[in-house]
Amino acid sequence: MCFYHASVHIYKPGQIVSIDDFEGDSTHDHAERQASEQEINIRFDELRPETITYSRVKCIYLFDSYENCISYVPKTSSTSFHFYMVKPISVFGGFPMCLVNFAYKNAGNIELVQKIAAEYWAPSHNWNVKEYLSAQIEIVQECTEKKLSDTNPYMDDQDLAKKWIKQ
């Protein structure tokens, strides 16, 4: 199965990309992250089931559809992203991406963050936009079409998360 990945790096088809290729802890640029966001990822990892060996702090993030991948990048981003179809060497996932942002926004509420992390690692709701974690991918091709549809499944997930958190 092919997945999709957004990156600031330029890759060629057939290239193998590994988390070991990146300096620091993650494929994300930690300089742009707030300390509270890094702390949330560490807290999520502390609650990660033992059967999932990839860390949110050190992984390559993938999406199961191209549309979900390009919707990951904010429309207002000044950073130039490249989008790739990839084959993961191994992958864990189907984790609801929107819950991470909810945890970031509620970083001061430890009980809520723990509830969110539990749902993230073992989803019990029908989330639309899921992220997958991998340690190594093979680039299949660069994708250049950047048009989004009029629907936004990520926003549907945000609405579901708001209702779920109130329960």
Image: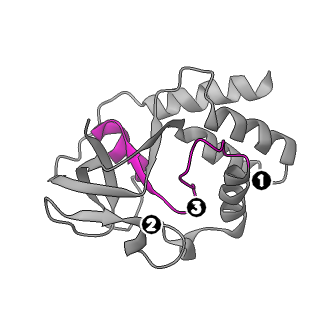
Q: Secondary structure at mark 1?
A: loop
Q: Residues within 10 Å of mark 2 (few under 14, many from 20)?
A: some
Residue 144 lies in the magenta-colored region: no
Dot 1: within a 10 Å radius of its alpha carbon, few (fewer than 14), some, or many (20 or more) residues?
some
* Residue 15 image position (x, y, % from top left): 19, 64
Q: Is residue 111 left or right of residue 163?
A: right
Q: Position of residue 151 (x, y in %)?
A: 37, 27
Of the pair 48 and 83, the residue shown nearer to us: 48
Indicate which disc, 2 or 1, sits on the residue closer to the N terminus.
2
Whether 4 is drawn above or below 157: the answer is below
Task: State the CA–CA distance, disc 3 to disc 2.
Answer: 9 Å
Q: What label does residue 164 carry, if any?
A: none
Q: Residues within 10 Å of mark 3 (few under 14, many from 20)?
A: many
Q: Secondary structure at mark 3?
A: loop
The residue at which mark 1 appears reads as: 107
Lower position in the chain sequence, tag 3 or tag 2: 2
Q: Work out which quarter of the rendered image holds the C terminus and state it.
A: top right
Taking the magenta stretch, the answer to whether it contains residue 63 is yes
Give the percent coordinates (x, y) of residue 82.
26, 60
Q: Residue furthest front?
A: 51
The numbered dot on residue 27 is 2
Q: Position of residue 94 (x, y in %)?
A: 48, 34
CA separation in Å, label 2 and label 1: 22 Å
Disc number placed over residue 57 in the picture, else none:
3
> In the rendered structure, which amino acid carries the disc numbered 2?
Thr
Residue type marked 3:
Val
Above or below residue 88? Residue 67 is above
* Secondary structure mostly taken by the magenta-highlighted segment of the chain: loop
Q: Residue at x 25, y 40 (%)?
A: 2
Magenta residues, as a range? 47-74
Please name the residue shown 53% across and 53% down the image.
54
